[in-house]
Amino acid sequence: MGVLDGVKVIEVAGIGPGPFAAMMLADMGADVLRVDRPAGGRGLSLGNTDKDVLARGRRSVALDLKAPEGLEVLMDLVETADVLLEGYRPGVAERLGFGPDDCHARNGRLVYGRMTGWGQDGPQASRAGHDLTYLSTAGVVAHMQGRDGAPAIPINLVGDFGGGGMLLVVGVLGALVERSISGRGQVVDAAIVDGAALQMAMVYGMRAGGLWPNARGGNILDGGAPFYDHYRCSDGGYVAVGALEPQFYAELMTGLGLEGEEIATGQWDMARWPEWRARIGEVFATRTRDEWAADLEATDACVAAVLEMEESVEHPHNKARGLHIEAFGVTQPAPAPRFSRTPSGTPTPPATPGQHSAEALADWGVDRDRIAKLQEAGVVHQT
């Protein structure tokens, strides 16, 4: 059960942002049916399928979409689906016979979600890429400070999942709302390069307003400000400081015992930021990460210990919030967002490709005798 209970989603298997979007829809209660290749692999970078958190919460059928009979099964599923998600390069789904026009000819109410790196058009649309190349072209990583002054290499959260999968989910949900008014489906073109650029909206505004004047590593949110940075402690651990507002900065100064020094009144003296950083660093280096966290996390100094994943699971706030769950033998993030009347259940384990072919196809209205014949012909595979 969930807010999307009754919504039927076809996920044509892919990697990265597409599965993330399908996972979120499944977490919210949609009936997501993943269509895998008969060969079994989904191109996953994670070899151990039963630990693949991104694949949680949905069933798998294995269809040979290059066989006319397999394609016809997919199109029969399309007739009763609300959403189809695919992550091929532009034109591939059309060549396989289940592009938007093909699907809308069978079901005019279908929301057809397309997930790509570069989008469906433009000179780079058909080219290969990955999170880092999309973020670079979108003007994102140039503003992230990395090692030795080079652009940072962020985990693929910013591109694949924030800019890609999350954008696809938002687009699909928006199209479903619009369909409730018009009665018509449409195509959602979600591209990682689009979503990455969109997440820079505030920085564009800050640059235009004169609040982001410097090169990488010299601005308020990119490591330039000494009150928005990481500091190494005596045990080698780190704390994060985010004391942006003056009242929070004052709390930080008090917590560090610096309230009587010149630094306490010089928060916005940018010429002295290197000096202030060195002074703050000296103080943090006198105690361990957890000692500082114990003293400052309970204040408004905006200081937090930098935690590893395993440590985050045990943090009192995260435990109180139920931020993580244990499912199919894996500690993992709990479904989000949270809803007051329709809470999400515990996700079901990831399916091996084709694990539910017969039962899932039957549940979606495919005749069982037909399924058996297709299995005999090698068009439908069951594991």
Image: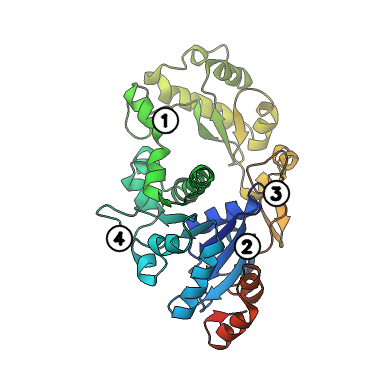
Return the x and y of residue 374 as percentages of the image width and height.
56, 83
- Tell me how far mark 2 sits from mark 3, CA to CA: 14 Å
The residue under the point 43% across, 59% down is: 104
Does residue 136 appear left or right of residue 39 in this picture?
left
Q: Residue furthest left?
A: 123
- Tell me how far mark 3 sits from mark 1, CA to CA: 32 Å
Give the residue type at disc 4: Ser
Per the rendering, the mark at residue 344 is 3
| Residue 259 in view here | yes
Q: Is residue 343 above or below residue 365?
A: above
The residue under the point 62% across, 40% down is: 235
Mark 2 lies on a secondary structure that is loop
Return the x and y of residue 300 as percentages of the image width and height.
63, 22
Q: Earlier in the sequence, mark 3 or mark 1?
A: 1
Residue matched to label 1: 202
| Mark 3 Cα shell of 10 Å, populated few (<14), some (14-19), many (≥20) | some
Give the residue type at disc 3: Ser
Which is more toward the observer, 124 or 103?
A: 103
Residue matched to label 2: 58
Give the residue type at disc 1: Met
